[in-house]
Image (cartoon, helix red, strand yellow):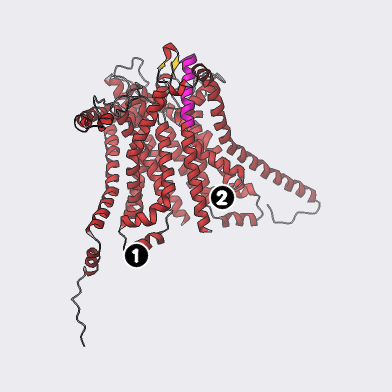
Amino acid sequence: MTITAPPAGAGARQQKRRLGDVWSDRVFRAVALAAGLLVLLILGLITWVMLSKAWSAFKYQGPSFVTSQHWDPNSNSFGAFAYIFGTLVSSAIALVIAVPLSLGIALFVTELAGKRLRTLVTYVIDLLAAIPSVVYGFWALAVFTKPVQTFYTHVADTIGKMPLLSRLFGGPASGASFMTAGLILAVMITPIVTSLSRETLLTVPQEDKNAALAMGATRLEMLRVAVFPRVRSGLIAAFMLGLGRAMGETIAVALVIGSSAQVTSHLFRTGDTMASNIAHNFGEAIDLHRSALIGLGVVLFGITIIVNVIARVIISRSNRSLWEVVR
Amino acid sequence: MTITSPPATPDDATSILRRSISTRRRVKNGLATAWMIGSLLILLVPLLAIVLYVIRKGAHVMSWSFLTKDIPIVSQFPGGGMYPAIAGTIVITGTAALLAIPLGVLAAIYLNEYGKQHRVARVIRFMADVMTGVPSIVMGLFIATIWVSSGLHLGYSGLAGALALACLMLPIVIRSSEEMLKLVPDDLRQASDALGARRWRTILSVALPAALPGIVSGAMLAVARAAGETAPLLFTIGVIRTANWNVLHGTNTALSQEIWSNAQTPFPAQLNRAWGAALTLIAIVFVCTVIARVVASRFTIARQ
């Protein structure tokens, strides 16, 4: 906008330009809003398109789509329970391993490391997060499955002989198994869970920690009284987001889980997940089989959305309560 | 009168502290510290194992002809290269970035400059967060059903793959750009307003340039993630053995997809090609990540 006074008689033009300015602002705002609404449009379209394409399989199979274990495209029976089970088990294993690891690293970064080391560790974790999942899967398939099978067999021969534990760790052990998939997933979700946990841990004011330390608390005691109570919900949200990531992870799992679906408590046996089944078979699938695989996608989408929504609600709640405290 | 006191030694204070903390507490604390350091070391093992192994295996096949030759028709035999896949990864990821970054930045501008805490803005923000959690295979299925083989029936193309990747990148770009715009001090905007600039002008010529390094860094991380994705491409781009730089027409291929299909074969030539592709892909992804970090660190210095 010019500050120089307009020449006499240019008043009308000035008026017109100002009107144009008002409109340009409205148009810009509308374009920006449209870009934002694209998010809602895409999520809506995903839900609608996939539900309508999966509908014929859902209608054909009925509720047994999620309860039956019998999945055989040749005889048109599509019971997806074994795949749902595989997704849940492999990501549960991943979470059990990734949670202590991530929390440990996040605490290392926030409590132990100096400034230099902190930057370095953050850098390394970024790189770990950047390794493509297909590379993880390829490496695991080519390098990891053989030695790990020997290890599993060893475990099955010792711990696997004990009562109760034999149900989880009993033999015969396979290199491609729920456990291998869970281990790879754990490595893959650790970076994201670490950085989310770190963000949460950084919200604790240094004064609170200093107060605990001044009372003579050791570092662990300080964490227990001053840090953990404050960040509990944030950490839970971080773990849930990691769980969502693990459940949706496709390619690495598809390469190392063995791709034979079964419902078993034995973690050293082969299994399959929803995402892996889609990745392996969608290309060749036709008609009802194709629809059923899209149905698997709908179930996977539904579960991950629920997990993510819960995590996000927890985060926004805890933010709000923090905000109220500040006020 | 004399006050007798033991001679002070430098480690007096620490020794008093040490005596006052019981062994149990000290051991527990030591274990906790060991847990923190141990976690980091445990995580470094797979990172080093994977990166070193890929470099060792990939270096064997890496050569100028590997980077510039087509994929052989009989892929069980050695020879040939990965040029089509490199071209595909570049052109598909690039198109996805062209789609997702401008839209994502615009959406972030709406959220931070116009919407703020308005209900619509809060819903968009929440859903963008949720959208970052949508599995990549679901994005692939979505584009496959709506664009490729049913719905619009447009068939396999690089563009279809780029659309799936763009859907993955969009929420990441939105949220990281919004965070960066949030960091721009309000003083700058007010100064521009006071000069009589309109809102859109303030945003485009003041707020956006100030946040640009941060936005670029976030976008590069999204690009790095998209370049490594396989699942969204499996049912959207098809297969091809010669380079196809035309993103709009014809089937295409990508490094990630070539690793996926070659990894599942028993033939050494194909496995070697997959290792070469893995090394190339990791190099591309790491370069993007490092650029993002460097730009981001410049940004922090500029802000101070």
**Residue lying at the far top of the rendered structure:** A75
The crowd level at tag 2 (other Cα within 10 Å; few <14, some 14-19, many 20+) is: many
> What's the mark number on residue A84?
none
Q: Secondary structure at mark 1?
A: helix
Q: Is residue A290 left or right of residue B22?
A: right
Front-most of residues B50 and B39: B39
Image location (x, y in percent) of residue B229 = 42, 31
Front-most of residues A276 and A161: A161
Instruction: Say if residue B255 shows up in the picture.
Output: no
Q: Nearer the viewer, mark 1 or mark 2?
A: 1
**Mark 2, residue position:** B207
Residue lying at 57% horizontally and 35% vertically, measured from the top left: A40
Q: Secondary structure at mark 2?
A: helix
Give the residues drawn in magenta, as a range: A284-302
Chain of the residue where label 2 is placed in the rendered structure:
B
Residues indicated by labels 1 and 2 sit on the same polypeptide chain? no
**Mark 1, residue position:** A214
Asked if A195 appears above or below A68 in the picture, the reply is below
Image location (x, y in percent) of residue B287 = 38, 39
Chain of the residue where label 1 is placed in the rendered structure:
A
Image location (x, y in percent) of residue A129 = 37, 39
Distance from disc 1 to disc 2, alpha carbons, whole Å, reads 43 Å
Front-most of residues B149 and B269: B149
Image location (x, y in percent) of residue A9 = 81, 51
Q: Which quadrant: the C terminus of chain A?
A: bottom right
Say what amino acid the circle numbered 1 marks: Ala
Instruction: Say if residue B83 shows up in the picture.
Output: yes
Asked if B61 appears above or below A71 in the picture, the reply is below
Say what amino acid the circle numbered 2 marks: Ala
The crowd level at tag 1 (other Cα within 10 Å; few <14, some 14-19, many 20+) is: few
Residue lying at 61% horizontally and 50% vertically, measured from the top left: B202
Q: Is residue B186 left or right of residue A139?
A: right
